[in-house]
């Protein structure tokens, strides 16, 4: 029944000079779900993301994506295979406009990315689609704005639009709402629910209200190991989880 | 847009008239170094890679062109072609070995490789060691244009310069250039969008090395000389200085930087070692006070006064 699982990790371990940031993690993400990865600071969540998307090489263990072993793949080919990540600190191309940011993602599809002799006006055919994507995440009015001038919430929206441009099968979002105000949180939450239709989302998030609201499954990580797994109801009652969060899970 | 066109016309007119006002050899030297700096800037300013070994491409291409023309009697166009091809091949080798290194390590690897090229040139007989390859015949370009005529030579050098600068400009404003910009701005993000960034950086490196070679080959025609100075680390440092001084984020900044540095060297040659010290002081000033360089600061100034 490997078909049910879009991601499976076995024994996944990352050691930094004697320190185990991730230790023997067996994570399974079911296709078509929103799966949250939570845990205290330093639990190893971002490291897990880096391992799964191949930005880091595991010290031990295996990673299967769609049943295929990607343990030795490089990060760009993982992205090409349909698994696209965001970063904990917002990842935009700051001095490019919103339109250009999205276009860079769309451009790969044209197959002209090595053509240094061709005018960049040849990319204008992508403008329509780029505008659609900007509109879909609510930043249609800012297409000509350099990304660096956007508010934090809009930068994150731009990141999602750029990610969606690749039409990924799976999205990994690392704290998509960190540092946001109420309004932005609601907007991004709606957006995530929207984009999750027909895709799989694995997200790290500290805001437990959001996690409770959005996710089908929650995995709790602490000190690099899986502490508990299940839906919000069962996880939030787990005594070990409560201890790890020192009561904040109920607060 | 119109303003840009006017400025462009003025610049071209000035470049065409210049040899009647200024010593042509000086102008051609500045144009060669200008092209060299523009090629270098494709890496530093537009890809975000600091190479400290670009003299190897510039200087070795100069030797190849000089040798081909003097010993084998190659025509100028073939001599240049040979120099450029060798520079491209060297760029590929350097690039493959260095591109995976990040930041200062990248600069160190390029420097180390360039030093190996330098020591090879010191030892190899065909370079004639300290003497260099001298009295290289200029010949006729395409069998038609007599390059011994200073004015003909000047317009040929100007044309090559124009073509080189245009190629870099085209590359920056191309689909390829967009990916380079993305890599420079946020490489992990570019990777996460599925770009194999090392290949793009390698392509930019080879392109830059090729054009640096073109600059070196043409320089050989101008001075009828290929010597150790051109492959020395000092030349690698000079091109960094020219680019930073003129403004690395700008298309024409490196040309301005090249003209300024060449002028300093030409007119202050009498005071010998002081030139190096003056260059050092300029370098420190640019790095600490005028980070955008001459053209960068000027553009920022225009922008500021426009907003007011
Ligand atoms: N490159 C590295 N070298 C050494 N230690 C590292 C490295 N990357 C992460 N760590 C350590 O591994 C542990 C897990 O880090 P990670 O960033 O995965 O945590 P996290 O769960 O994402 O935390 P946060 O909620 O603060 O983002 C931390 O103690 C961190 O200091
Ligand atoms: Mg983290």
Image: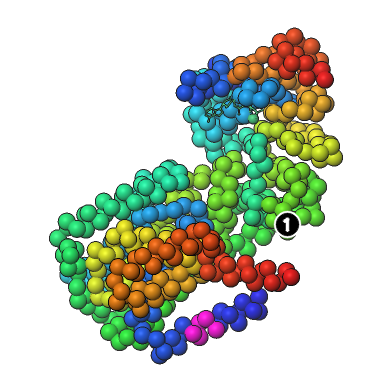
| Left or right relative to A102: residue B104 | left
Ligand 1 position by quadrant? top right
Please tell me which residue is depicted at 68% across the width and 68% down the height of the picture.
Answer: B304
Q: Nearer the viewer, residue A251 or B3?
A: A251
Q: Which residue is mark 1?
A: A145
For the point 50% across and 24% down, which residue is it?
A16
* Residue A65, magenta (yes or no): no
Specify whether A57 is left or right of B262.
right
In the picture, the quarter occupied by the N terminus of chain B is bottom right
Q: Where is residue B121 shown, x and y percent of the image? A: 21, 58
Kindly indicate the quadrant of the structure image that contains residue A180: top right
Residue labelled 1 has its Cβ within 8 Å of some atom of ligand 2: no
Residue at the spot 21% in from the left edge and 54% down from the top edge:
B120
Is residue B13 highlighted in magenta? Answer: yes
Residue extending farthest to the top is A239
Q: Which residue is at 55% across, 84% downward? A: B10
B34 relative position to A47: left or right: left
**Number of numbered markers:** 1
Residue A149 image offset from top left, x and y in percent? 72, 53
Q: Which residue is farthest bottom?
A: B20
- Give the vertical position of B188 relative to A24 (above or below): below
Please say whether residue B81 is visible from this viewpoint.
no
Q: Is residue B44 visible from the viewing direction of this image?
A: yes
Please rate how many residues cluster around mark 1, counting C-alpha atoms within 10 Å: few if below 14, some from 14 to 19, many from 20. Answer: some
The span shown in magenta is B10-14
Q: Position of residue A222 (x, y in %)?
A: 65, 18
């Amino acid at each position: 029944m490997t078909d049910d699982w879009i991601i499976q990790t076995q024994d996944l371990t990352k050691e930094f000079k004697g320190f185990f940031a991730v230790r023997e993690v067996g994570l399974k993400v079911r296709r078509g779900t929103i799966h949250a990865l939570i845990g205290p600071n330093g639990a190893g969540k971002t490291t897990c993301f880096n391992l799964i998307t191949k930005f880091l090489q595991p010290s031990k263990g295996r990673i299967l994506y769609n049943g295929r072993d990607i343990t030795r793949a490089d990060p760009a080919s993982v992205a090409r295979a349909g698994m696209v990540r965001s970063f904990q600190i917002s990842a935009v191309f700051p001095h490019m406009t919103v339109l250009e940011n999205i276009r860079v993602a769309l451009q790969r599809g044209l197959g002209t990315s090595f053509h240094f002799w061709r005018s960049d006006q040849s990319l204008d055919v992508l403008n329509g689609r780029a505008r659609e994507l900007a509109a879909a995440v609510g930043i249609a009015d800012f297409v000509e704005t350099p990304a660096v001038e956007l508010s934090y919430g809009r930068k994150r929206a731009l990141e999602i639009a750029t990610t969606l441009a690749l039409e990924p099968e799976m999205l990994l979002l690392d704290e998509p709402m960190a540092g946001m105000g109420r309004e932005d949180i609601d907007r991004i939450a709606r957006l995530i629910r929207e984009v999750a239709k027909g895709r799989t989302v694995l997200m790290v998030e500290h805001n437990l209200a959001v996690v409770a609201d959005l996710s089908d499954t929650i995995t709790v990580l602490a000190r690099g190991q899986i502490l508990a797994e299940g839906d919000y109801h069962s996880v939030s009652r787990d005594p070990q989880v409560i201890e790890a969060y020192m009561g904040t899970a109920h607060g | 847009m119109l303003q840009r066109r006017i400025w462009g016309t003025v610049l071209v007119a000035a470049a065409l008239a210049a040899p009647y006002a200024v010593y042509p050899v000086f102008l051609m030297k500045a144009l060669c170094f200008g092209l060299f700096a523009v090629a270098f800037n494709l890496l530093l300013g537009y890809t975000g890679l600091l190479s400290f070994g670009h003299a190897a491409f510039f200087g070795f291409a100069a030797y190849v062109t000089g040798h081909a023309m003097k010993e084998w009697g190659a025509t100028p166009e073939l001599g240049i072609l040979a120099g450029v091809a060798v520079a491209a091949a060297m760029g590929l080798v350097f690039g493959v070995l260095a591109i995976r290194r990040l930041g200062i390590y990248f600069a160190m690897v390029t420097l180390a490789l360039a030093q190996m090229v330098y020591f090879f040139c010191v030892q190899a007989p065909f370079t004639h060691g300290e003497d260099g390859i001298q009295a290289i015949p200029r010949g006729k370009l395409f069998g038609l244009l007599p390059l011994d005529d200073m004015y003909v030579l000047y317009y040929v050098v100007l044309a090559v310069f124009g073509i080189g600068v245009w190629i870099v400009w085209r590359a920056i404003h191309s689909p390829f250039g967009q990916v380079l910009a993305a890599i420079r701005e946020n490489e992990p993000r570019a990777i996460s969008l599925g770009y194999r960034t090392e290949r793009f950086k390698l392509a930019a490196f080879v392109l830059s090395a090729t054009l640096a070679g073109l600059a070196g080959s043409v320089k050989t025609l101008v001075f009828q000389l290929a010597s150790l100075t051109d492959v020395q680390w000092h030349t690698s440092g000079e091109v960094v200085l020219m680019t930073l001084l003129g403004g690395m984020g700008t298309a024409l900044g490196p040309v301005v930087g090249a003209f300024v540095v060449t002028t300093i060297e030409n007119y202050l040659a009498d005071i010998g070692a002081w030139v190096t010290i003056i260059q050092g002081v300029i370098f420190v000033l640019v790095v600490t006070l005028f980070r955008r360089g001459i053209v960068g600061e000027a553009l920022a100034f225009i922008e500021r006064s426009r907003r007011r």
